[in-house]
Image (spheres, rainbow, N blue to C red):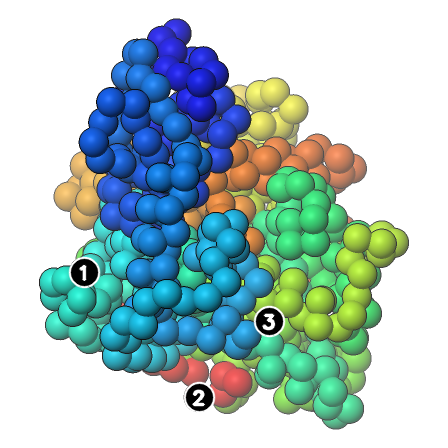
Amino acid sequence: MPQISINDRPVSFEPGDTILQAAKRGGYHIPTLCHMENCAPLGACRVCIVELRGAAVLPAACSTPAVEGMQVYTHTSRVRKARRTVVQLMLSEHQGDCTLCERAQECELRDIAASLDLRMQSYQGCKPPMTIDASTPALVRETGKCIGCRRCVRMCNNVQGIGALFPQGRGFETVIGPAFNQPLSEVVCVQCGQCAAVCPVGAIYEKDHMEGVWQALENPDKRVVVQVAPAIRAAIGEPFGFPPGTRVTGKLATALRKLGFSDVFDTNFTADLTILEEGTELLTRLTKVLRDKEPAALPMFTSCSPGWIRFTEQVYPSILDHISTCKSPQQMFGALAKTYYADKLSIPSSDMTVVSVMPCTAKKFEAGRAEMGRNGLADVDYVLTTRELAKMITAGGIDFASLEDEPMDAPLGISSGAADIFANTGGVMEAALRTVYELITGRELPGTDLHVQPLAGLQGIKEAQVKLENLLPDYSFLEGVTLRVAVAHGLQNARVLAKQVADGTSPYHFIEVMTCPGGCIGGGGQPRFTTDEIRQARIAAIYAEDEGKEIRKSHLNPEVEKLYNEYLGAPLGQLSHELLHTSYGGNHENPGHS
């Protein structure tokens, strides 16, 4: 490998590396505010400047290629002085009270200023006007806090392919936001929150549901139940000092009880339920096309990700009938909590408050949709992101690291390993295949330890094929069919598969789409800053959670079976349709939503 010298020590680097990447390989940290993994270098913030022997100027490490023999110095007096000036100029325009800012304890700009020992402001520059855009159910923008790093722009344009955010104007007049300075609610925005996840300051963040939850917990007339998404258990430990990918499921359940929730349940329960409903729906569509020779919308898309649903409504409405009619596991849970579980407790639905803990800001938007409720009551009342729950645990004076492990409550807290892997890209598809294959063949899905290896990992679009042979008599019409499935994460990748379906050229039968890179483990509401290394650690933790469970197939969940026997009847039955299924295409706020 070629080498450069960093601070007079040799460092090997890969051809094509920048100085920033080479420094990381050598164990040197160079601060930056604009750099983003897997995106082309931008060099916008200039915080990562370094000194090159023989060079008159200080280049940006993030955008300068490493060259054999180069001599780099990362913290000379010249570099430190210039870096301090750059950060002071940013602070001179930054509108924000650090004692009250949403990002006060995790602001990257503040951390860099502290590392440079900046204790007073040397420049009193003009402040840009502060505009607060709270027009969407999920996100809030505060333009005066923006430092122009362009991270949100590249995430929205290059990674998600949405284009809701872009620099408007020039120089000091530049504003990062929607075209013509419109509110987010007036442009194509799926509210995925990836912009908030990469913003280094508090210029964009999730809309706060914490106060509503605190008030509900203090209301003696309300029974407040909480559901926890599968991705949370592999990430909630990070704000409390645990390494990424540490499984803290038991501590999480204990913390939620200490906060005062009456019942601590698991969204995994309705993830298992989703597989039964969605798998049956897929088999119904295949039956229509392949046996009855009737039209049906194939391929069928998964419907768990609200950002993906909104993307389809706004960009590809012609393929909406290809999306499963199943509500997401979050919404299924809310519907059952206010009917099935409320009936068990003999309390009215109106006395039940359902709180979700989700890795996703778009879940706030989803919970407020008009179709996500009945009789004037929303299925889900409040949605907390992982970050919000961490703040509540801290505010509650709970020492998370020292908590004992406790289980989730029954019945809505019992789940299979297949439900856990909903958190990972490819996980919903794998969970579905485990059940659908066994239901039509009577045999376990072939593979290594039930995993479908081609569907794992962080490749943007993945595909797999399953040959259907030696089937049970009721499914003989599928004999010899090669079931073709695909998985996409990140909406730029999903766009490729959506276009194929719109054009009538898709070769697949079933497609999973997750809005966020890596799936829910990389959601817009997860602890910042999420890199591929952190995504991989969380993914590994989720697979370990699955592999450690006695039951690893959704159709073997005994509580789901009991639910059908006692209440729902059968997948796709009349009551299932009423509570667990919906249709898409609108965007009207639920009048019953809190």
Label 3 secondary element: helix
**Which residue is under mark 3?**
334
Left or right of 401 on screen, residue 355:
left
Residue in front for this viewpoint, 271 or 360: 360
Direction right: furthest residue: 404
Image spot of residue 528 (x, y percent): 51, 52
Q: Is residue 309 visible?
A: no
Q: Mark 3 or mark 1, which is nearer the start of the sequence?
A: 1
Q: Which mark is residue 591?
A: 2
For the residues labelled 1 and 2, the Cα–Cα distance comes to 35 Å
**Vertical position of residue 73 compared to residue 5: above or below:** below
Q: Mark 2 or mark 3, which is nearer the start of the sequence?
A: 3
**Which residue is under mark 1?**
167
Q: Is residue 502 visible?
A: yes
Identify the image quadrant of residue 92: bottom left
Residue at image coords 59%, 67%: 388
Left or right of 539 on screen, residue 292:
left
Residue type at the position of mark 1: Pro
Q: Nearer the viewer, mark 1 or mark 3?
A: 1
Residue type at the position of mark 2: Pro
**Vertical position of residue 591 compared to residue 393: above or below:** below
Label 1 secondary element: strand
Residue at image coords 37%, 65%: 122
Identify the image quadrant of residue 227: bottom right
Left or right of 102 on screen, residue 214:
right
Residue at image coords 62%, 28%: 450
